Image: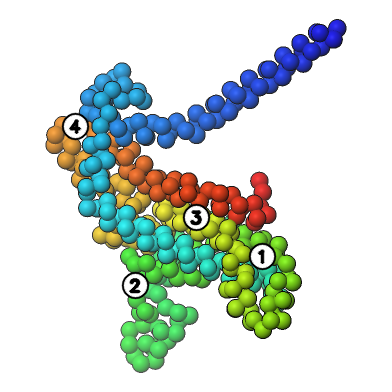
Amino acid sequence: MKYKFLTLYFAKKLLWIIFRLVLLIGISYVILFPYVSKISGSFMSPQDFVDTSVKLISKYPTLDTYKAIINDNQYYKALFNTTVLSGLCAVSQMLTCAIIGYGFSKFKFRFKGILFVLVILTMIIPHDTLQLSLFMKFRFFDIWGIVMGVQKLFGASATGIGNLLNSYWPLAILSLTGLAFKNGLFIYIMRQYFNGVPDELEEAAYVDGAGVLKTFVRIILPMSVPMLVTVFMFSFSWQWSDTFYTNLFFTDTKTFLLLPNIVSIPSSLDTQFAAKMIPYEEAIRNTCGLLILAPIVLIYLFAQRTLIEGVERSGITG
């Protein structure tokens, strides 16, 4: 009887292990297959594209598409512009959201709860509903109507400061005011972290003669490095892969950014290869996708420990 019970127990345990293994393999396949197919397709040669027996593994691997894209001037220009824009936005949002989160966590002021609810609402309201107002605001930019008021006063044409589109200014202004993409989440993360910082640290600094600003810069910020790195990485990766704001504010095709121009970058190469009767369009687009993804993967590989530590300290789970 005991032997039958143990056999049944181990059979159930074995079935559960097999079920979990099959489930995990299936989920991994669904997640990884697009990346595997793109990586494989980027190394395929012309012979592979006309060979119907080739599915994922290339028979004649080549680096021609990588060489063609990297040697293209548009790629370097787009890579530089995207790196600068993403870096500036990430640093601005990191510092701005840290200051705002610290204020919500450690200071008492009127309408604090209402204002924090508005911060949370920025994570809920779809960005598409703000598209027209954001475009018009930066197309005819003005600060509270002051410039237009002065222009009207002196009889000039009331046009405001002017057109800020096709420049870094729209995203810079949104980042510095805590209104950029996902800034509500960053503020919430920083607030949750600062809630766990003991008030005694600040009180000791105040007793030693440090003011609010000095306490924040000299004590609070150095303690918050894991959280700051987390916010920086999230902001950089989301700005790097953003198409909503970049397509909204960068309407000039001469302003090259990497992701919005994923189609225009290989267009000349498509023509090049088509003239040689080489069916490389799919391989070019696969390679472009991998070159866009590579910097984000490298950043994560080098900073994953700090990122995980920051997420754990934020108190957000699930």
At label 4, the amino acid type is Ile
Q: Which residue is mark 3?
A: 233
Q: Which residue is mark 4?
A: 278
Of the two numbered discs 4 and 3 on the same chain, state the one appearing first in sequence: 3
For label 3, the SS is helix
Q: Which residue is mark 1?
A: 194
Are the two marked residues, 1 and 3, in contact with CB atoms closer than 8 angstroms? no
Which residue is pictured at 19% across the width and 32% down the height? 278
For label 1, the SS is helix
Which residue is pictured at 66% across the width and 65% down the height? 194
Are the two marked residues, 4 and 2, in contact with CB atoms closer than 8 angstroms? no
How far apart marks 4 and 2 lie (CA) works out to 43 Å
Q: Residues within 10 Å of mark 3 (few under 14, many from 20)?
A: many
Task: State whether residue 270 appears in this view.
Answer: yes
At label 1, the amino acid type is Phe
Residue 217 badge: none
In the foreground, 10 or 49: 10
Instruction: Give the image location of residue 201, x and y in percent.
Output: 70, 71
Task: State whether residue 184 appears in this view.
Answer: no
For label 4, the SS is loop
At label 2, the amino acid type is Asn
How far apart marks 4 and 3 lie (CA) works out to 39 Å
